[in-house]
Amino acid sequence: MSTQRTEPARGTRDFLPEDVRRREYVVGVIRRVYERYGFEPLETPAVENIETLLGKYGEEGNQLVFKILKRGEHEASGQADLALRYDLTVPLARVMAHHRAKLPRLFKRYQIQPVWRADRPARGRFREFYQCDVDSLGSVSPLVEAELCAAVSDALTGLGFDDFVVRLNHRALLTSLLEAAGIAREHHSGALVAIDKLDKIGPDGVRTDMEARGIEGKSAARLLEVFETARAGGTRLGLDVGEAGAAAWQNVAAILALLEGTSASGRVRVDPGLARGLSYYTGAIMEIAVPDLAGSLGGGGRYDDLVGMFSGQSIPACGFSLGLERILVVMAERGMFPPSLASAPADVMVAVFDAADAPHAVRLAARLRDEGLRVLVYPDADRIGKQIKYADSLGISVVAILGQTEIEAGTVTVKNLVAQTQETVPHEAAGAAILAGVKQGQRG
């Protein structure tokens, strides 16, 4: 008999118990930080109308949207009317336009849900992955960007990161630099997409990409020279950025000033070469870099025009998105997870000698759970040695033995697998004896 393939679809993963515990730990830290800053939770459907997504991410982003074919009698048409959400920002803009009357004028929300992209899988890059977004809508104040940078810095610091950098730039400054370098406006979008790959393919790769997009080699070289000088610590751009560029510099300076005294102070670095490929950004843009990672742990920026694409009314907005999968990959490689996450699935396992004794085991388990213990009941009447071996394989440090003798006497034998000791106690004392054994196992 032939067998079917069992691996998940390329670019997706199964999350085993340890994976889920790690993910929930990271999400818990991030959620608590965001709520300390006054952000509220929001969730949106996995599926959006296709017109909601297309046209919001630029040419390359459109190609990565997972489209859903029409169903039933329309399936043969090959047309798509729905799509899996590409990010959490565009759905937020739709929600803001649709529920405007129900939401506060200054709306601060966080959202932690999976998104899907038809991208090429790589280290820390998947087709299905979680994003941890935090956004503030309704204000153009640079305090918004400063608080977002501080909140993200608090979250990463809380997870144990100490070597990250928040790169900061401004789209208006980028536009001014492109114009000053002699790049025609019709090539600006392509130039930004190419520049966004600077960390991945290097200056030579970006120059080649620009030329393939019709940008003159001389203009590409001038632009790259400015970026490389800035990244090396230079304070002069070497190009006249005009009034718009100067205003962008002032906005960036205001953000930096507001960050003084926060957890992000000293971590934020101005990087004129930071582009962020998504086309909906209108102002300041940010990205988090850590050593030895191709790509970033997250990024974001201001997108003042996006909500207006749905409502016709301009609503200023700015947000930051952390890539949960990349954070998990880096933390696993660096051994950053607390040892407690590798805990056993239960504090105690109740052993059953005879199938007829199962009701007694179930009642004991219920009593122990009422006392706050996590209890696993072994379902089969196997040899006690086999049951103990199973508990040990799961890291469970205590076994509650309930044989005929214990049942008749109203007692429980509590076996400590760490200390290799056991004691028989009344039912009402079993919880305390088990808890003592659990604590001993944790110390061990």
Image (cartoon, rainbow, N blue to C red):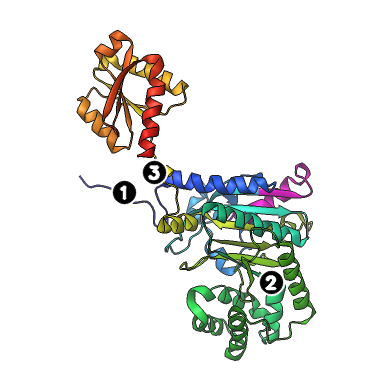
Q: In this rendering, which labeled residue sits more in front, label 2 or label 1?
A: 2
137 in magenta: no
Mark 2 or mark 1, which has the lower sequence index?
A: 1
Give SS at disc 2: helix
Say which residue appears at 61% left-offset and 60% top-offset: 54
x, y (%) of residue 379?
A: 29, 25
Which residue is labeled 3 in the image?
A: 342
Which one is closest to the eye, mark 2 or mark 3? 3
Residue placed at 74% from the left, 82% from the top? 241
- Percent coordinates x, y for residue 16 in the rendering: 38, 45
Give the mark, 3 or 1, whose residue is nearer the N terminus.
Answer: 1
Q: Label 1 sits on what residue type?
A: Thr
Q: Position of residue 375 (x, y in %)?
A: 39, 27
Task: Evaluate whether residue 443 shows in this view.
Answer: yes
Dot 2 or dot 3: first in sequence order is: 2
In the image: residue 440, left or right of residue 46: left
Q: Nearer the viewer, mark 3 or mark 1?
A: 3
The quarter in which the C terminus is drawn is: top left
> In whole angstroms, how far apart are the C-alphas of marks 3 and 1?
26 Å
Magenta residue span: 86-109
Residue beneath label 2, please? Answer: 171
| Res. 373 image quadrant | top left
- Look at mark 1 in the image and give the residue it sits on: 6
